[in-house]
Image: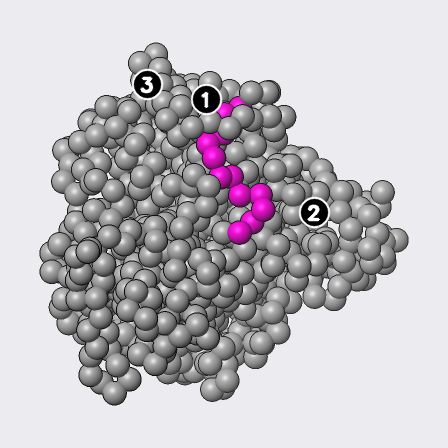
Amino acid sequence: MPSMRGVFLPRMDGNYLEIVMPSTISRRDFLKVGGATVGAVLIGQFIPPQVAEAARVNGLLDATNSGYIPSMCEMCVWRCGLLAKVDGGRVVKLEGNPEHPHSNGKLCPRGQSGLMNTYDPDRVLTPLIRVGKRGEGLFRKAAWEEALDLVAQNMLDIQQKYGPEAMLFSTTHCLSQFQFENLLNAYGSPNYGTQRSLCFNAMIVANLVTYGMEEPARKYDDLKYIILTGRNLMEAISTSETSALSQAIDRGVKVVTLDPRFTKTAAKSSEWLAIRPGTDLAFHLALINVIISERLYSFRSVNNNTSGFDKLASAMPQYTPEWAAAITDIPADNIRRIAREFAHAAPYALAHNGWRTSNFVNSFQTERAIAILNALVGNWGVAMFPASGEESGVLGAPPQPAYPRVSAQRLDGVPWKYPFVPLKIGVFQEMREAVLSGTPYQAHGWFISRQNPAMSLPDRGRTLEAFGKMDFIATIDILMNDTAWFSDVVLPEASYLERYDPLNIVGSKAFIRQPVIEAQGEGKSSLWIYKELGTRLGLGDFFQYADEEDYLKQQLAPLGVSLDQVRQKGYVELPGEGPDFSEPAWNTPSSKIELFSTTLDQGGFAAVPQWEEPPAPPAGQFYLLTGKVAQSTQFGTQNNQLLHKYSDEPRLWMNVKTAQTLGLADYDLVEVASSAGSIHIKLEATQAIRPDCVYLTPGYGHLSKGLTTAYGIGASDSDLHVTYTDPISGGQALSQTFVTVKKI
């Protein structure tokens, strides 16, 4: 007779019931019955698979109910908490976890469609090795042993022939990112590409030199006034922040949105300012001018929390509302009124620093101006707070030796060309450019995980050319994305509903991502893949965990909490009383908010924001705008059949009057061309965009025929975008691309 272990389950009456758990039940068996629930005992409780199986053994199942297993979403980087409803070993519904501060019981459309991410018929379920030419899509199935051996051998060959710096590593922001970085650092390559330079480098670097932190947290509870500069929260959904903004609007907060497009956020705003692209900086400089010249700033905040006010004030008189009006197309009286309204609402006023603002090379100075505007009205501790991060020392980690010393220059110019860009962020598009130029040296290999450079980097033709210079490319993903299509080896990852990832700290809790169903095919977690690959590279000492569960147990060791407890609850409370906002510690040279940045000054850049004139399109050309929609996340969700079902094929937005002038009408097929390339797409004539702009939703125009749902749908803005890099933050200036439009 098998041995039994007692499990105590909470009853509805507050008492506990002991049931027995057979020791012979395996994790695989638990997951197969993970949808079961414990009738009258556990209705409404979170039911991890092992508890459900124990309940079945004890005859306590109620077949009319289904089980919910807590985990975390990965349909975007917001990582909301979810409850997976499992029935018969399949996920049938995803709902928001009310215990998680990012979801608060809600999931956005992308999050709710996440089960189709797992059950996509195009899933890559076995390792694949290329047998045809790159881009032909000819692969053969392989065992993990062969595929990993092949990847490791190529990486070792490149290391021995050219040095470890000849191997590029790139990934996107994810929970296993630390172990990805562990692999590249142990291997010895300095060349690390993330998506951040394509998104929010300007914001991060501006905040670092102003506040000494990457991005302060924002609180909407008591706000009276919000300025959104290109931040389209109603479509670029960050679930908790989008909900907070919606609730604030319901309470009557005034929202002013600057955007050349009439977005869904603009539609919900009190005021929409159709600003000329690239001139957000002029608008904010004028706001600062009014607030300082009319002495509307918070004297207490400026005196106690900032440094460099006098130098800032002396630089602002030239930036009057009348000066800005001629540049931005926003009347001077409106600018002056908004400045006064914003200051009078202080400290319950927030200038949202967005992620990309106007997407020009002057975006860094725009972000600086926004940070300074917040400091002037003294909203720290009311609207803005230190972001809660992964506090060092709270969680344990596997032991490992020191990394090898790296002497080679980075290909992207960090820090020798971009001294203010953190090494962990880099300048991705410049790394690609260095591959093409072969300077300061030639790269030969590329290891990519959960990233799609073929779609995300500007000027896709140059990215494909860079692929052609590689001796070897390996990609980890769950689908045959456009980059995997051009790879030599594709390693199948288990989906986020099928795997463990490292714990994620949000506020005062550490949340778990755990498998809620058994992994399909031969998909494996990144923790497993990096460890297996590291072992083959002779780097086993850097991956001292037996398996994924052991990794999490080592993280939990300092807390004295078992993995089973965290599985069941979905999170663990962290020790301590939480952050103290009463006396913020700004990690700047002055230990204050730096209105005049000594860091920028020493680096030879403008220490206070100053006007930088953006380029404008020549006659007959248009600004090319890009942005997000609620149904998609960048370039990774277009093959999701649920999202595809409710998404119209994207068209090129053009102002209706401009279209009439050009003899164009709705649904006309047009050619859009830039100096980088051209596309064919249908037209959408609308009043919701400035006459000098056109807009294209990103993430479409996939090259991979392995994406049977997304292939052939829409066109790619990456075929049009020209590479422009901000010299301070390294951010890509996407909207600085100009295009012509003509009927086909």
Q: Is residue 476 left or right of residue 156?
A: right
Q: Are dots 1 and 2 in contact, CB under 8 Å?
A: no
Q: Is residue 15 left or right of residue 715?
A: left
Q: Are dots 1 and 3 in contact, CB under 8 Å?
A: no
Q: Residue furthest top?
A: 161
The part of the image, by quadrant, that contains residue 274 is: bottom right
Q: Residue at x 61, y 29 (%)?
A: 137
Residue 220 location in percent, x, y?
39, 77
Circle 1 residue: 472
Residue 40 location in percent, x, y?
34, 81
In magenta, the rendered stretch is 119-130
- Residue 130's label in the rendered image is none
Element class at badge 1: strand
Q: Residue furthest right?
A: 663
Disc 1 to disc 2, C-alpha distance: 29 Å
Task: Note whether residue 536 is visible.
Answer: yes
Circle 2 residue: 713
Q: Indicate whether 608 appears above or below 333.
A: above
Q: Who comes first in sequence, dot 1 or dot 2?
A: 1
Circle 3 residue: 156
User: 302 or 102: nearer the eye?
Assistant: 102
Disc 3 to disc 2, C-alpha distance: 39 Å
Residue 215 location in percent, x, y?
34, 59
Q: Is residue 222 left or right of residue 634?
A: left
